[in-house]
Amino acid sequence: MNKTEYWNLIEQSKSYKEDQVEWLTEELSKKSIDEIVDFEFIFESYMKESYQSHLWGAAYLIMGGCSDDSFDYFRGWLISQGQEVYEKTLKEPEFLANYITDENLGEEGVPEYEDFLNVGFDAFTLKKGGDPEEWDEDLYDEMLDLLSQKGWVDPTEIEFDWEDEDDLEEMFPNLWERFGEDPLG
């Protein structure tokens, strides 16, 4: 699987709205192990690419705070929105000031999608005959080994380019105007 095929799958999955993760997991599980691992490798590459101080600041402002886990879920949500939204947001996080609506937010009314982080592993588990509802450490280790064979390396630490909300107001005037006094979180 290449990046074009990856984004095509994400685009197709968007039409399933509430069932996006289920549809994507099921479709992916029909593919070969190598394609599933490629999907996960590409997903993790986008997670790594989006692991940026600037983007974390935008998420923090939008939700009125953003922990490590919330930032992961935010980036999962961002990737689930498709290539165009993902790329525009990385280039200019202020894009989200106009993009975010009730229709594209997660179940909790915030831009987070925790379940999206598990699509690749759940599809891998299904393909191997396991149950995605039950954690399988051996399958997880097997998938991590396959990812490392492809060259996967965990992201390094972020050095923040902002310290507090005053910095965010200056960095993101449009996001501040929309969410500064009334965050989604």
Image (cartoon, grey):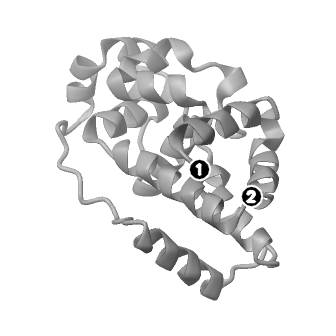
Give the image location of residue 79, x and y in percent. 54, 38
Quarter residue 130 falls in: bottom right
Q: Say which element carries label 1.
A: loop
Residues at discs 1 and 2 in contact (Cβ within 8 Å): yes
**Position of 169 relative to 40 (above/below):** above
Circle on res. 42: none
Going by the numbered disc 1, the residue's amino acid type is Met
Where does residue 109 sit, x and y in percent of width and height?
66, 33
Q: Is residue 14 above or below residue 144?
A: above
Residue at figure coordinates x 23%, y 58% from the top left: 157
Q: Nearer the viewer, residue 60 or 36?
A: 36
Q: Residue at x 43, y 21 (%)?
A: 88
Relative to 83, 135 lies left or right: right
- Between 28 and 122, the one lying in front of the other is 28
Q: Position of residue 45 (x, y in %)?
A: 42, 51
Q: Which residue is mark 2?
A: 31
- Above or below for 87 versus 160: above
Distance CA(mark 1)–CA(mark 2): 10 Å
The residue pinned by badge 1 equals 1
Q: Residue at x 79, y 33 (%)?
A: 17
- State the residue lying farthest toward the bottom: 138
Query: How far across and down, in percent of the image, does residue 159 sit?
Result: 17, 49
Residue shown at the point (62%, 88%) measured from the top left: 138
Taking the image as shown, residue 8 lies to the left or right of residue 165, namely right
Quarter of the rendering containing residue 20 = top right
Q: Nearer the viewer, residue 91 or 149?
A: 149
Q: Is tag 1's residue or tag 2's residue first in the polypeptide sequence?
A: 1
Q: Quadrant of the C terminus?
A: top right
Q: Is residue 148 left or right of residue 99?
A: left
Q: Residues within 10 Å of mark 1 (few under 14, many from 20)?
A: some
Q: Amino acid at mark 2?
A: Lys
